[in-house]
Image (cartoon, helix red, strand yellow):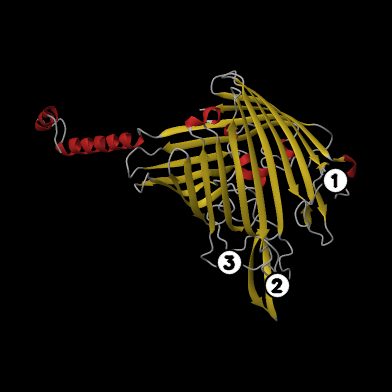
Amino acid sequence: MKLNKWTVGLAAVGVVSLASATTAKADEAKMSALQTALSSTTISGYVDTSMQWNVGTGNAVVAPVSFQNSTKADGFNLNVVDLAIDKPEDDSPWASGYHIELWLGPDANTLATDSNPFSNPTAGGIYSYSYHGEGEYYSYTEGNQGASDFAIRQAYVVLRTPVGNGIDWKIGVFDSPLGYESTSSPSNPNYTHSYGYTIEPTELTGVTATYKVNDEISLQAGIADVAGPMINERAFIVYEGEEYNYPTKAESYKTYFGAITLTAPQNWGWANGSTVTAGVLNGYSTSVAEYGGTQTSWYVGGTLSTPVTGLKVGAAFDYLNAGNTSDDFTFNGEYDYDTWAAAFYANYQYNDKLSFNGRYDYWNAQNKNYLGETFDSVTADVQYNLWANVISRVEARWDHAEHGVWFGGTDPYYDNDDGYGEVGYPWYSEYDPANARENAFMLALQIIYQF
């Protein structure tokens, strides 16, 4: 290690020692290396808040979409605090980086990426068994023993391999490639989510590869542990069910997914930049049906530019099949079902501050083992960004149940014949049928600060 002449001179008269000078120089070198490593790291995020009024007396059951529940009705809300730390890839052939995104707040509970099955909101419990007395008995530990206001939104390592145009890999926890809407509210045109988003896979733990064939075609494929968001979940472990539900998946059982995105080229005139994405996912999920099963999700959707300046339209279609929901011979697929949702979007960017966003949403959950209903929804947002870095929007939403009174009520629970507490809807309930209704109306103001 080379020391400057002043350091050598001070060491000669005993003011400093060469050992301490060498240590200081080494520490300085370490700090320099650390600063170099952190120089391209960025910190970003947002604070998401809302004020919400759900019209009518009794709002125990609101619109059946993700991140909406009775605790947000008729009051002021902190939705979530998002904190992201990034080291993006550079342009080198063997580039690397990472993305860490953390959620703090009530929406972290709904995200359900908790790795502990006893505290994960999507897990019902775990069975263990042993032999006792004359035979075998089962003990069941109930799940939902408290979720967490802290969640890992995404966390993955990014690696590039110089094959063809370059393959970019993500290894860790990442968003599913299926879906029109994002989990992150600032990236969406509306405050509330659609029915389609609610039945889609969201976060996955595994590995995914993206390959850009050219400016018009991009491919993505990957493997994950399961189709659900629980981190490090395994298909061969039973997290919920009754004593007749046994782990039947092999230890090697995994979830597979793929998607293709097409982008209109520049020479397409006003349609330039329009995109369409189609994808499919198949794997095990504890959240489908009553005891978990194989989830197959199909998605196609896209955004179309129009000849009208500032106007874009979009459409999305989601189809979900739940199969193999009862591998035990007793039920033989009794809880299998199909459900699908479709949505249409319109966005008009009037100027750099003001925009109008609309959505029509339809959910066909009409089958014996799911909700047994069809829902319509119309959502309208006016967004005006008055302050720097702030998204502010007012939303009006109407949900309609076509065959029953599914909304309202003051208690969303009922007791079934076996005496177990089950989640129900107002028209099931003996507690407050007078407040059950077929329509739900909501008015909300959302304020998001991005940094």
Q: Which residue in the structure is indicated by mark 3? A: 249
| Whether residue 142 can be seen here | no
Q: Which element is circle 2 on?
A: loop
Residue at 63% of width from left, 40% of height from top?
A: 107
**Amino acid at circle 2:** Phe
Farthest right residue in view: 434
Residue 146 position within the rendered picture, expressed as x and y whole percent measured from the top left: 65, 49
Horizontal and vertical percent position of residue 9: 10, 29
Is residue 382 depicted above or below 138 in this figure?
above
Question: Disc 1 to disc 3, how far (Cα)?
Answer: 38 Å
- Distance Cα–Cα, label 3 vs label 2: 15 Å
Residue 121 in view of the camera:
yes
Q: Which disc number belongs to residue 56?
A: none
Residue 421's image quarter? bottom right
Residue corresponding to mark 2: 329
Q: Quadrant of residue 191?
A: top right
Q: Under tag 3, what secondary structure?
A: loop
Q: Is 381 left or right of 155, judged from the image as shown? A: right
Q: Nearer the viewer, residue 143 or 278?
A: 278
Q: Earlier in the sequence, mark 3 or mark 2?
A: 3
Q: Residues within 10 Å of mark 1 (few under 14, many from 20)?
A: some
Residue type at numbered disc 3 = Lys
The residue lying at 15 percent from left, 39 percent from top is 1
Name the residue tied to disc 1: 404
SS type, badge 1: loop
- Judged left or right of residue 208, residue 15 is left
Instruction: Report the residue at 66% width, 40% height from top.
Output: 67
Residue at x-position 57% and y-position 64%: 236
First reached walking from the N terminus: tag 2 or tag 1: 2
